[in-house]
Image: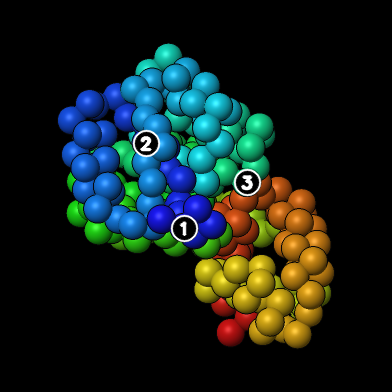
Amino acid sequence: MNPISTIRLLIADGQDVFRAGLKTFLNYQVDIQVIGEASNGEILLQKVIELKPNIVLTDVRMSILDGVFVTKEIIRCLPETKVIATAQYAKDDIIIQMLDAGVLGFVSKTAHPCEIIEAIKTVFMNKPYFCDEITSKLTKIVEKKYQLRPKLNIVFTDREVQIIKLICKEYTSKEIAHTLSLSKRTIEGHRTRIMERVGAKSIAGIITYAVEFGVYHRCE
């Protein structure tokens, strides 16, 4: 197993059966290594700091320390570690809170293990992954907010609009740089400024803003 390409994964869930079943399935993946597991938020945070995984797969409803708090702490302490949220049923407010906390992926706990693997590999490439159920809910949330909330008076440059469009298409910074013939460092600088301007804490936040305020459609 090549340590450079292997995804180091930590699974956190209060249900022993769910963790065990998923771990058994993932053990057959040559490019994913389950390096640890946690049954509550406190243990999760301790193990993340100790093991420094590439990806954390965590239930939104963790005991002792909840998923939202732990996600914020993970990203604050280890910004290179990416978080995927799981849920049996996610209410709208939890979806928004987890997105604001910085998760890059969201999958249902009832999803087929193959979809969870797809989410892990997608997020590992620094691309957002949301299952159909969460995407549908997110679209409805955005539509509702769009009806009630006035558009923010933010004027983007043509270059920023190009970058936002490519982010919405799930391009990585490297892919955007190649597409626009710019350096990766320049793209990351633009991305940071866009996040600051729209008040986003993650790539998911940029996508949400772009859909909510029509930025993506103005790119078309």
Give the quarter of the image for residue 198: bottom right
Give the quarter of the image for residue 43: top left
Kind of residue indicated by mark 1 = Asn
Q: Position of residue 75 (x, y in %)?
A: 61, 38
Q: Residue at x 33, y 57 (%)?
A: 30
Kind of residue indicated by mark 2 = Ile
Residue projecting furthest to the top: 64
Q: Are marks 1 and 3 in contact (CB under 8 Å)?
A: no
Q: Which residue is mark 2?
A: 11
Asked whether 81 or 168 is in front, the reply is: 81
Asked whether 46 or 103 is in front, the reply is: 46
Give the quarter of the image for residue 177: bottom right
Measure the alpha-carbon separation of dots 2 and 1. 21 Å
The disc, 2 or 1, on the residue closer to the chain's N-terminal end is 1
Element on which disc 2 rests: strand
Within 10 Å of disc 2 (Cα), the crowding (few <14, some 14-19, many 20+) is many
Q: Is residue 39 above or below residue 76?
A: above
User: Residue 80, which numbered label?
Assistant: 3
In which quadrant is the N terminus drawn? bottom left
Q: Which residue is mark 1?
A: 2
Kind of residue indicated by mark 3 = Glu
In which quadrant is the C terminus drawn? bottom right
